[in-house]
Structures are given as structure tokens and as C-alpha cells.
Image (spheres, rainbow, N blue to C red):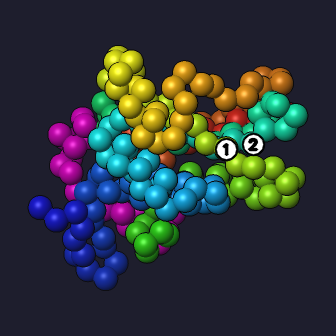
Amino acid sequence: MSSYTEISSDTFVFSRTIVLDDHFELFFRCSDNMSDSDVEKHLFAIDRHELQAVGVYIEENGYRIAEVELRVDWKKHIELIKIHGNMFDTCLPGWKPGWKNHRTAPEAYVAVGHLAREAKNRGLEVRHWISVSDRIRESDTEHKRVCNELGYEYGSSVAPWKNPPIEHTRQIQGLPEGSVTTRRIS
């Protein structure tokens, strides 16, 4: 089955996995500092359900000051495919043509765009982190492999928060297995 079907000029249907990929890809591209090859590696790991979350953050004086996380609940993703099938109509209210002219919800890319702009205005670097899926975390060997393939150091962590951040989580409209969390110190 094709991963894309045009039903009419206003209706675009994609596989649910492609829709998730589009959200993650736009998230990475809006962060403004990930190479094409790194984006592709991350998307490949997402397609294999090896990652459950990715994040971008900025730090100042050794402390995180802002962060955006994009998370997928793989169990819910699989349940939704079983219930509704794999094809997904992206003509939803608020979804706009974005990367590759695919329609995506604004929750993730707007938040990461704001963070990237803040980093640029402050002269700070946007940094990335990953969270591997539970099945990958069960095996140190697999966990190390995923980290190595994506360019992260196994067992490393991000800078701590100086103060507890204010946190806001949103489900991606129309894509209930996806959520976006923003964190920021007050």
C-alpha cells in the first residue's frame, strides 16, 4: 500500500508513520542546527520505534534555561493503527502545509521555532537530546548502538536546571500518540 494518497485537491492521506515522521522532521529542521544526514539518521531510528522522545534545549552558564520535547507513545500509536487503520487524513483544522508541503500540526514546530529564535537572539547554541524507547532501554548493547549511530554518548545527560522549570504539555491535535512539552525557567 502506498504511503500517500491524494483523494481530492483538498484531502491528503498518508500512513500514520509518515505523519509522525513529518512532525519529527519539521521539529529537527526548525531547531536550525541539525545536518540533513543527522535528521535522516534520527528519522530512521524513529521509524524503527527506537526513540520515544527527542528534545532541543538551550543552556546558559551550565544550566538549561529552555527546552522543547516531542514525544510519541508507541503503544498508543499501534493501538490507533489497529482501530483506525494505518492511513491518516492530514486535512485537519489548524494543520498547515509545511515541510515537503505535507500538512503538519503547529504544536511542535512553533515551539521549537521560538526556542531557536531565542537561542539566536541570546547567542546560544541549540542542543539536542534523545530518549530511547523502552524496548531499546532493556538492552545496554542496543541502547549503546542507538546512541552511537545517532552521535550521542551512552549514559550522558543534559545540563541540569538551575531552578525547577515551568512545564506545559500539549497533545498534538488530531495525533493523540504525539505530545509536545515546553519547559522554561521563570
The residue located at (22%, 71%) in the rendering is 5
Residues rendered magenta in the picture: 78-97
**Magenta includes 95?**
yes
Residue 39 spot, x, y in % from top left: 47, 55
Residue 117 seen from this side: yes
Quadrant of res 92:
bottom left
Disc 1/disc 2 C-alpha distance (Å)? 6 Å
Q: Residues within 10 Å of mark 1 (few under 14, many from 20)?
A: some
Amino acid type, callout 1: Arg
Q: Secondary structure at mark 2?
A: strand
Q: Quadrant of the N terminus?
A: bottom left
What residue does disc 1 label? 127
Which percent across, then down, holds residue 70? 53, 42
Quadrant where the C terminus lies?
top right
Q: Is residue 135 left or right of residue 176?
A: left
Label 1 with label 2: CB-CB less than 8 Å: yes
| Amino acid bearing label 2 | Ile
Percent of width and height locating residue 14: 27, 62
- Nearer to the camera, 57 or 78: 57
- Residue 105 visible at all: no
Residue behind mark 2: 58
Q: Which numbered circle lies on residue 41?
A: none
Residue at 77% from the left image edge and 26% from the top image edge: 161
Q: Is residue 79 above or below residue 138?
A: below
Q: Is residue 39 left or right of residue 180?
A: left
Q: Residue at x 75, y 42 (%)?
A: 58
Report the residue at 42% width, 40% height from top: 149
